Image: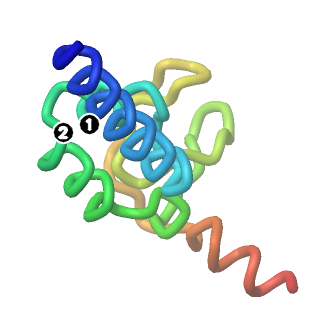
């Protein structure tokens, strides 16, 4: 019975970390796993992790797909990306400007 309570606590931490990570624009499952296996530190890391919607973006020079500035390879065409001369505004800044 004692083990069931501990597993329930781990699931709660995992869900909380996964939800926080997803809200910030990252993967639910990665943050679920981190928060499940390292409960307190994993949830704290998810809370302190950057907002992906605040990251500056760039366009791939080959196919034109808009990617995060920290991406090194285009996920559509596989082009290795160098640091761009021009940076696009973040998703949240673009939403604020259009509203």
In front of the other: 67 or 61: 67
**Left or right: 70 as drawn, with respect to 38:** right
Which corner quadrant of the image does residue 67 belong to?
Answer: top right
- Badge 1: few (under 14), some or many (20 or more) residues near its Cα, within 10 Å? many
Q: Which residue is mark 2?
A: 39
Sort mark 2 into few (<14), some (14-19) or many (20+) by Cα contacts within 10 Å: many
Quarter that holds the N terminus: top left
Horizontally, residue 41 falls left or right of residue 65, namely left
Instruction: Name the quadrant containing residue 50.
Output: bottom left
Proximity of marks 1 and 2: CB atoms separated by less than 8 Å = yes
Residue at left offset 61%, top offset 22%: 76
What residue sits right under mark 1 in the picture?
Answer: 35
- In the image, residue 18 sits, relative to residue 79, either above or below, namely below
Spot the residue most to the front: 1
Of helix, strand and loop, which one carries label 2?
helix
Q: Quadrant of the C terminus?
A: bottom right
Relative to 76, say whether 47 is above or below. below
Residue 22: which numbered mark, if any? none
């Amino acid at each position: 019975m004692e083990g069931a309570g501990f597993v329930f606590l781990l699931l709660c931490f995992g869900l909380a970390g996964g939800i926080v990570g997803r809200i910030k624009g990252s993967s639910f499952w990665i943050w679920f796993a981190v928060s499940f296996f390292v409960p307190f530190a994993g949830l704290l890391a998810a809370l302190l992790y950057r907002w992906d919607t605040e990251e500056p973006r760039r366009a791939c020079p080959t196919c034109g797909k808009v990617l995060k500035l920290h991406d090194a390879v285009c996920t559509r065409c596989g082009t290795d990306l160098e640091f761009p001369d021009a940076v696009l505004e973040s998703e949240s800044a673009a939403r604020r400007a259009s509203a």
